[in-house]
Amino acid sequence: MAAPWLGCWEAPARALRGLAGLGRDFAAEWEAQDLRAALFQLLLLWLGLSLVAIQLAWRVYGGAVTALCCRPGMGGQNGGTPDGSSHFSSWESSSTESVKTHRE
């Protein structure tokens, strides 16, 4: 009699066997097609160089981009304070607060 918990490992084992078979087929195709292999290597190299260039550009210009996109201060969108005066009229504010204009 087989243990009942062995059944839960059947699907992942079948998936791994399928992936291994796919890998063997890919390797056989890779050896048979030199042009496809060269194109794949070229595109993989292009992707790698692009990712390295993006990383280097972010190290150089990341602070400037962050400063442009995020306003300093407390609250508001992106951690910044909203520009302009409040849209609430004076009767909506609490009675203990003094009324301030945007120039104060």
Image (spheres, rainbow, N blue to C red):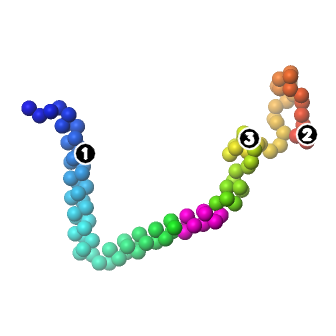
Could you give the CA–CA distance between mark 2 and mark 3, rounded to whole angstroms? 17 Å
**Mark 2 and mark 3 residues within 8 Å of each other at the beta carbon:** no
Secondary structure under the numbered disc 1 in the rendered image: helix
Which is nearer the N-term, disc 2 or disc 3? 3
User: Disc 3 vs disc 1: Cβ atoms closer than 8 Å?
Assistant: no
Residue 36: x and y in percent read 32, 74
- Residue shown at 20%/42% (left/top)? 10
> Which residue type does callout 3 highlight?
Met
Q: Of marks 1 and 2, which one's residue comes earlier in the chain?
A: 1
Which of these two is toward me, 101 or 55? Answer: 55
Count residues near mark 2 (Cα–Cα under 10 Å), then give few for <14, some for 14-19, many for 20+: few
Q: Is residue 60 magenta?
A: yes
The residue sitting at 17% across, 32% down in the picture is 4
Residue at which label 3 appears: 74
Residue 100: x %, y % from top left: 89, 34
Q: Amino acid at mark 2?
A: Glu
Magenta region? 53-61
**Location of residue 25 in the rendering, given as x and y in whole percent from the top left corner:** 22, 64
Q: CA distance from mark 3 to mark 1?
A: 49 Å
Residue 71 x %, y %: 73, 49
Residue in view at x 83 percent, y 23 percent: 94
**Mark 1 surroundings: few (<14), some (14-19) or many (≥20) residues within 10 A:** few
The first of marks 3 and 1 along the sequence is: 1
Tag 2 residue:
104
Prevailing secondary structure of the magenta residues: helix
User: Is 9 left or right of 103, judged from the image as shown?
Assistant: left
Mark 3 falls on what kind of element? loop
Q: Secondary structure at mark 2?
A: loop
Tell which of 6 and 33 is nearer to you: 6
Which residue is tagged 1? 12
